[in-house]
Image (cartoon, rainbow, N blue to C red):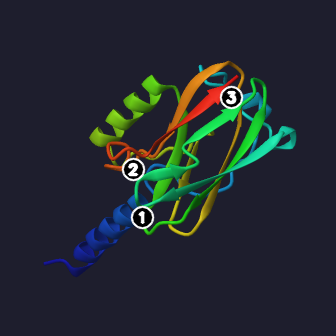
Amino acid sequence: MNTKLVLNAAALGLAIVAGSVGAHGDERPRVFDASKVEDTAFGREGNPKAVTRTIKVEMADNMRFTPANVTVKRGETIKFVVHNGGKLPHEMVLGTKQAIKEHAELMKKFPEMEHADANMAHVQPGKVGKIVWQFAKPGEFEFACLQPGHFEAGMVGKVTVK
């Protein structure tokens, strides 16, 4: 057997595994670029220089967010500081109820999917992530953890925009 071929295959396998450890995004700081901001049904990426309020959110292995309900004013730019106090990776993903549900279904089909959009923070145990979001429209929106099994276990919260 060709030893070099075996070593290259093993190295490729390790690279694939290492690359999937941070699947579904990572903790790299997001750089705000106003030219790339897109409006959604639940708002838009917020300018960190325009933050009007900071809300701390705790995530835990009991599959709950604290607080689980947040109220904000329309037009307000919020910085969510999301702490993972558990031993499992968690995330906070903002969206409409329908968008969260669809994203959760996609994650079931493609658990290794990688992306790091402005409306999400993927947080390793003991670490902190941030989301800066401007809520442009009134209504009720959700945030959820879409790690495998977490959404199904009830790791969901609500944002009410008045």
Secondary element under disc 2, as helix, strand or loop, is: loop
At 55% from the left edge and 69% from the top edge, which residue is drawn? 126
Image height check: is 155 above or below 74?
A: below
Q: Nearer the viewer, mark 1 or mark 3?
A: 1
Mark found first going from the N terminus, 2 or 3: 3
Q: Which residue is mark 1?
A: 88
User: Is label 1 in contact with label 2 (beta carbons under 8 Å)?
Assistant: yes
Give how far across and how far down residue 158 sits, in percent. Answer: 54, 34
Q: Residues within 10 Å of mark 3 (few under 14, many from 20)?
A: some
Q: Which residue is mark 2?
A: 147
Q: Which residue is mark 3?
A: 44
CA distance for labels 2 and 3: 23 Å
Mark found first going from the N terminus, 1 or 3: 3
Question: Image quadrant for the C terminus?
Answer: top right
Give how far across and how far down residue 4 sits, in percent. Answer: 27, 77
At 52% from the left edge and 33% from the top edge, which residue is drawn? 142
Q: Is residue 119 visible?
A: no
Of 64 and 123, nearer the camera is 64
- Amino acid type of the residue that numbered disc 2 sits on in the rendered structure: Gln
- Amino acid type of the residue that numbered disc 1 sits on in the rendered structure: Leu
- Amino acid type of the residue that numbered disc 3 sits on in the rendered structure: Arg
CA distance for labels 1 and 3: 28 Å
Secondary element under disc 3, as helix, strand or loop, is: strand
At 76% from the left edge and 47% from the top edge, which residue is drawn? 54
Q: Residues within 10 Å of mark 2 (few under 14, many from 20)?
A: many
Secondary element under disc 1, as helix, strand or loop, is: loop
Give how far across and how far down residue 17 sits, in percent. Answer: 35, 64
